[in-house]
Amino acid sequence: MEQYLPVLERIADALERLSPVGSIEYNLTCADAFIWQTEPDRLQPVHHVKHIDLDLLVGIDQVRGILQKNTEQFASGFAANNALLWGARGMGKSSLVKALHAAVTSPSGQKLALIEIHREDIASLGRLLSILKNSDRRFLLFCDDLSFDNDDSHYKSLKTVLDGGIAGRPDNVLFYATSNRRHLMPRDMMENERSTAISPAESVEEKVSLSDRFGLWLGFHGCSQKTYLEIVDGYAARYELSIETESLHRHALEWSQTRGARSGRVAWQFIQDYAGRLGMQL
């Protein structure tokens, strides 16, 4: 029998992947965060989500306030919009989502369940929603760095989930995505459609309409030197770094010059480096 065991294991794995979603029991209360995995479908619990406190996210006050209000409405059981956070790298898009998950609770004190879904698993969103829709919990689906390339048809699955199909999005599920691309697709992809399609305008509209399905469209832009230094000051104060402000700013600006950019991410990387020099663990 030992020679047949590998074959039997492969058959068992294949049957498990083909089994109906409803036949699998999911524990949706064992953690406050999960990662959606496929092949086979499963929700992997995450018992500690590393996040930055909301008050340390400097320079994005307006979009932070809008998304916080939207998230609080959803946690309270009221109407809320799916949100697309787009714009400059390192300006706190994903950090804001994780910070809000940590900060926002329902009136009864229950936390939202954060579920991360990878871009390549977008096609499986329908199966995930069928698992979540009958739960008493409220779920915040999160896709970081979402974008679509040429010949990628997964965006059609996302369009249906966001605002389409006869089933629609369950009331206990909200979808937040971050992207460096305003319309989630590269410009050359849309320009190619204009040059090759029989009806160029209609073809481009069909692709651009994906970003229109998000009720909130929040832009994140590169920060000025003043804002960059304010972010650095906030981190230095929070972690009680022993350094004079003038020296801190000089080192922070030198660090940003080596990176060729100023952003919240660059500020955090500088603080980590400086804390390490001081023998500190953040």
Image: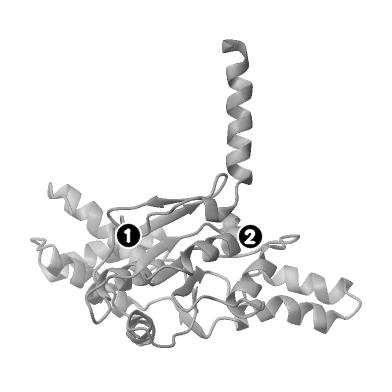
Task: Give the amino acid type for the residue marked by disc 1 in the picture.
Answer: Thr
Would you place residue 281 above or below residue 224 in this image?
Answer: above
Q: Position of residue 99 (x, y in %)?
A: 30, 70
**Which residue does the image show at 58% across and 27% down from the upper left?**
9
Q: Which comes sooner in the sequence, label 2 or label 1?
A: 1
Q: Residue 29 carries which label?
A: 1
Would you place residue 164 above or below residue 94 in this image?
Answer: below
**Which residue does the image show at 83% across and 77% down from the upper left?**
194
The reply to whether residue 73 is visible in this rendering is yes
Residue under label 2, please give it.
123
Q: Position of residue 245 (x, y in %)?
A: 13, 70
Task: Give the amino acid type for the residue marked by disc 2 in the picture.
Answer: Ala
Would you place residue 120 above or below residue 144 in this image?
Answer: above
Which part of the image, by quadrant, shows the C terminus?
bottom left
| Mark 2 residue element | helix
Which part of the image, by quadrant, shows the N terminus?
top right
| Mark 1 residue element | loop
